[in-house]
Image (cartoon, helix red, strand yellow):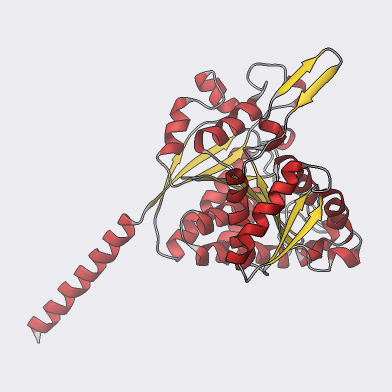
Amino acid sequence: MQRATCRMRLQAKATQAARLLSTQAKASKVAVLPGDGIGPEVMAEAVKVVTRAAAKFNFAIDFEHALVGGAAYDAHGEHFPESSRNVCARADAILYGSVGGPVAEQHLPKWKDSEKNAVLGMRAAFDLAVNVRPAKVYPELLHACPLRPEIAASGVDLVIIRELLGGIYFGEHRTDGDMAVDVCSYTADQIRRPLEFAFAAAKARRGKLTVVDKANVLDTSRLWRRVANEMAPQHPEVKLEFMYVDNAAMQLIQNPASFDVMVTENLFGDVLSDAASVLPGSLGLMPSASIGSSINMYEPSGGSAPDIAGLGVANPAAQILCGAMMLRFSLGQPEAADAIEAAVSKAFVEGIVTGDIAAPGVKACSTSQFGDAVTSYL
C-alpha cells in the first residue's frame, strides 16, 4: 500500500512537472509599447486582464516593455529606436498604446511627426499590410451611439479590413508649380493579402464580405474586383458583394447592420474605418490590429489624449479588447479572447463604465476600476 501511494505521488509530481514544462514551452513573448499620454494607464489595465486570462486558461506570456513616441524621444532622441525595434522583432505579438503630445507642442522635436515616425516605422519594419478594425454597438451603450435609436439597436457589429502598404499613400507624390500629382497603384499580390484575411474573417463571422471600391472610375478598383472574383470560388461559404465607396459611406450611417466584413484599399479604408469608429459612441471602444507577414501589432484606434493623461478617467476598453484580438489572431487562444470580450460586455451590462460612455445620471468608474471589473468577470 505504501509503495502504491508513493508511486501515485511520484506520478502526480511527474504529471505536474510535465504540465509546468509544457506551459513554459508554450510561453509567448509580447512586446508592450505603452507610448504617451493615457497609453501607460490603459496599457496597465490590458496587461492586467490578459495576465488573468493566461492564468485562467493555463498558458504563459512573457511581457517585455519598450519605449515609443515621445517617451522614446526623451530617452533615445528618436520616436522608434533600435532598442524598441529589437524588442518587437523577438516577440510573437506587439501590444501598442498611443503616441503624441499636446496640440500646442506639435512643433517641438519631441512631438513633431512622432505618430508618423512611430506608426509608419512599425508598419515598414514588420510588413504590417492588413489593418483590422471592428466596430460594434453594445446594447447597453445605445445612448452613446450618435445614430437614431432604431438604427443603433439594429445589431451593428462589423469589421473593416484595410490594405495598409499600397495605394495612393505609397505612390509617387510631386508638385510642379500649379500642378500636383499623387499616384495610386496596386498589384494583384498586394490585393490578395487583405482579401485572404477578409474571406477568412467572414467565414468566422456571419459569412458576408463586401468589397468596397470605385470600379466605375478607377483601374485599381477594377483590379480589386478581378482578384476578388478569382478568389471567391475558393471560399464558397462566403457571400461576396461589391459596393462603390460613396454608397458604402452612406450605408454605414443609414444601415450599418447590413455589413459583416468590409474590405478595401488604403485610402478608402482610412476614411471608412474612421467613420465607423464613431458608431460605438467612443474611440475608447475601438480596438484594431495590423497584420504582418511574421508578426501582428494591436493598438486602440484613439489617440494619446494628453489632456486627460494621469487623471485616471481614460477608457481602457479598446486597449483591453486589443489584448483579446492578440490572443485570437497571434497567440492561438480563441477561448481566452472570447472570455475577455464577454467580460468587457458584462462590465457594460453591470453599468461599470468610464465617463466617455456613461449615460446621464450614471456614476463613471475610473480607468483602473474598469480593468478590475473586467478581471473579476473573467
Residue placed furthest toward the bottom: 1
Left or right, 224 with respect to 79, comes to: right
Viewer-nearest residue: 43 or 361: 43
Look at 83% across and 43% down and name the residue there. 217
Viewer-nearest residue: 100 or 202: 202
Residue 319 appears in the picture as rendered? no
**Relative to 209, is 32 above or below?**
above
- The quadrant in which residue 35 appears is top right
Q: Can you give x and y, in whole percent of width and height, for residue 263 in the image?
A: 70, 53
**Relative to 11, is 168 above or below?**
above
Left or right, 326 with respect to 108, comes to: left
Q: Can you give x and y, in whole percent of width and height, for residue 220 in the image?
A: 72, 42
Left or right, 264 with respect to 118, comes to: right
Viewer-nearest residue: 318 or 184: 184
Look at 54% across and 26% down and name the residue there. 72
Look at 70% across and 41% down and name the residue there. 266
Q: Quarter of the image containing the C terminus?
A: bottom right
- The quadrant in which residue 196 appears is bottom right
Q: Quarter of the image containing the N terminus?
A: bottom left
